[in-house]
Structure formats: C-alpha cells, structure tokens
Image: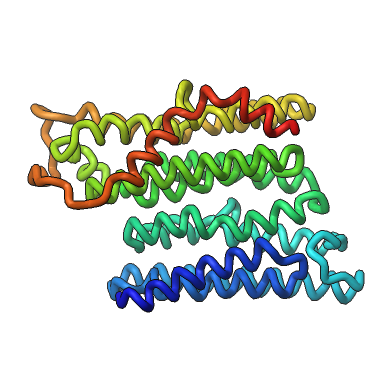
Amino acid sequence: MNPYVLTILLSSLGLGTILTFASSHWLLAWMGLEINTLAIIPIMAQQHHPRAIEATTKYFLTQATAAAMILFASTTNAWLMGEWEIHQLSHPLATTTVMLALALKLGLAPVHFWLPEVLQGLELTTGLILSTWQKLAPFALMIQVAPTINSPLLVAIGLLSTLVGGWGGLNQTQLRKILAYSSIAHLGWMVLILQFAPSLTLLSLSLYIIMTSSAFLTLKTNNALTINTLATSWTKSPTLAALAALVLLSLGGLPPLSGFMPKWLILQELTKQGLPLSATLAAMTALLSLYFYLRLCYALTLTIYPNTLTATAPWRLNFTMITLPLSIITILALGLLPLTPAVTAMLTL
C-alpha cells in the first residue's frame, strides 16, 4: 500500500477513536465509530486475497449493524426522554439496545461469532490493530453508559463471554482463531467488573493490550499461523520461543506474571460486592482458557527433535525486523505483577 494512503488511513483511525473519546453527544460518538470503521476497511482488504476480502465484508456488515443499533437507540432515547447526552441515557429500551450494539462491536458473547472468522482472514499486523486499538472506542462508550445498564445483564454477558472464550479455543489449530477466543474471554472479564470498579476494567484493558500485542508480534516475528508452524519456531530463536511461552502463560493469568494481576483484583472485587458465585464461575472458566494456552506452550517448547513434525523447519536466518517494540512489550507482559500494591493504591485514589 502507498505510504501516503496508509498514513491517511492510520490518522483517520486515530481521529475516529479520539473523537469518540472526546464526545458527550451520541451523534458525535457515532460519527467517531463510523470514521474508525471506514478507516480500517482498506487496511484489512489490502492483501486482495479472497479470505481477506471475506473477512473485511463480514467486519463491515457487523460494524454497520452495530452502528445502526447505536443510532436507533440514541434517537429513541432523544425522542422519549428528550436527551442526546451520553450520560443521560435513561430509557430501558435504549440502554439495552446500546449495550447489545457495543457488545456486537467488541465481539462479546452471545454476538461474538464474527470475531474468530474475521481475525482468521487477516494478516497478523492488521489482526493486532483489530484486537487492540479497535476495542478502545466502544469500551469508552461502554464505561460511560455502564451505570445506567441493568447489572445482571452485564454480569451475564461477562460470564458468558469468559465461558465461550475458553470453550471456543479448545479445539482450534489456527493461532489467529485462538487469539480471537482469548480476546472474547478477556473482554468478558472486563465487562464482568465494569459496573462495580471501572478503574479495574481500564487496568485489565491496558494489560490485555500489552499481552496481546506481545503475542501477535511474537507470532509475526516467527511467521507462525498454525500450531504446527509454532512448534518449529524454536529453531529461529530459542530465546524468543521461551519468552513466547511465558507470554502465553501470562495471557492465561498464571502468577508470577503480569496477567495474574487483573484476574486477582477482579475476583477480589467481585467477592467484596457479594458475588462469590460469579467469581467462582469466572475462575473456573479461566481454566478452560488456560488449557489452550498450555497446549500452545507445549507445542512451542516441548515438541522438539526427535518428535515427528509435519511442518517444514524454517531456515535459521538473521532477523531483519525491528524487535525493540517486541522486547519492551514482552518485558511489560511478564514483569508487572510486583507493582500490584502501587496499582491498587492508585486505583483507590
């Protein structure tokens, strides 16, 4: 793609998200979401491959549907209650419709079916943008409307997403689909705590972006798209293979890695709020996700010679890619747990 065109598209992507962040009026927020969607579509379709075009079409249809639902809900609220402000969303029909529309935009269960299929058709860099940056604008709106949404609805969507995210990834061999289900599960944890502690949601989102970026950049460096290819990536860089396994375990939420921090604090907060059953169910669904992360770790670190592999072994060539962003993000994805006391102190300010 032409660098000037790419610069314009990435600038529009940033503009759409910032516009949604800064808006207090529903029409302006909707406009930001639309700019965001229209900017990423040419980036998704730049490969001119049938899978990429199919993924782009599916993404466009789902995002357009969600945007239409948001516009319908905000217009309904303005008609019935006389308010266009995001904070003044008060009619039950409007709040429920907006919640479902934002769940569709994010890929939360039960409207998650598009996300694994779309992510599977994209290259890893575009998939990284879709899994991280594209979640920011809908989450900003969700945090603003969360106080008016029915609490059991949020908890139900959160628990269902953690369950679907864990269950859906169990039988996958494609790494992009596994990361898509991982995304659904992590978003479920964030929605679960959204109404009780929005600051914890922001913490979880930040750590999710760090860990997912590290996972995507590792796969891009190793040029791995399936579990079989991942199993031979240790020949390229044994150090990176070892760190990639730790990043996957961090995504699974194992101590003493960074990914344990948000899960620990969320379970603690749910128990404080008198929801021990929800906390128990969320912890049990995390075990499902942990299983497929462990499966990837096994393929990455334990299936070496003399085990038989069907994938072609890669050449041991020198890296020409810039690995500084990967190094920084991997350190953050692995080593932030000791900062938990400082983080909790900041959250209570």
Q: Residue at x 81, y 49 (%)?
A: 147
154 lies left or right of 137: right
Q: How is the image coloured?
A: rainbow
Asked whether, in this view, residue 215 is left or right of residue 163, the answer is: left
- Residue 304 image point, x, y percent: 15, 29
> In the figure, 44 relative to 254: above or below?
below
- Frontmost residue, 7 versus 109: 7
In front: 333, or 74?
333
Residue 287 visible in image:
no
The vertical placement of 216 against 335, above or below, is below
Quarter of the picture containing the N terminus is bottom left
Kindly identify the residue that appears in the image at 28 percent across and 46 percent down. Answer: 323
Q: Residue at x 63, y 54 (%)?
A: 139
Q: Give how far across and how far down residue 118 sits, in percent.
A: 42, 62
Classify the position of the C terminus by image quarter.
Answer: top right
Residue 82 visible in this rendered orientation of the protein:
yes
Report whether 49 appears left or right of 331: left
Give x and y (percent) for residue 53.
36, 73
Q: Residue at x 64, y 75 (%)?
A: 31
Residue nearest the viewer, comparing 119 with 200: 200
